[in-house]
Amino acid sequence: MEYLISSSKIQSEKVDVNKIFARYHNIKGTKSADNGRIKEALKEFDQSIELNPWYSPAYFNRGTIKADLGDFEGAKADFDRAKELEMPLIRESRNAFSLRYNQV
């Protein structure tokens, strides 16, 4: 399903429903984990990653659950993937900061 929203530049852009539901399942997973429902949380994080394999918070959260369950290799793989996904965003932020504040 595809939805359109209007941006401030009077252009339309597609709303990626999978990204929205990936965030939903990630939030649901954190609530499950907070309430002690660890296996349910793991399923929610798996669902989040299935919907959006580029959503780093779900990898980080799933890694935390895997570590709690003693799956340290799985946890490390998820933490590494989360870091790998975040690095381009960190670089972009640093570049934007440099461009903005190093101009005279």
Image (cartoon, grey):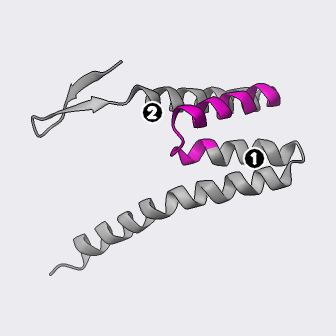
Residue occupying the point 75% across, 47% down: 64
Q: Are marks 2 and 1 in contact (CB under 8 Å)?
A: no
Residue at far top of view: 1
Query: Chief secondary structure of the magenta span?
Result: helix
Residue 19 is marked as 2
Q: Position of residue 81 (x, y in %)?
A: 62, 55
Image-based side of 10 in relation to 100, left or right: left
Amino acid type of the residue tagged 2 in the rendering: Lys
Residue at far right of view: 70
State how far apart marks 2 and 1 are (Cα).
21 Å
Task: Tell me the residue that label 1 is attached to.
Answer: 64
Q: Position of residue 13 (x, y in %)?
A: 22, 33
Image-based side of 96 in relation to 10, left or right: right
Residue at far left of view: 10
Region of the chain picked out in magenta, as a range: 37-58
Above or below 62: residue 12: above
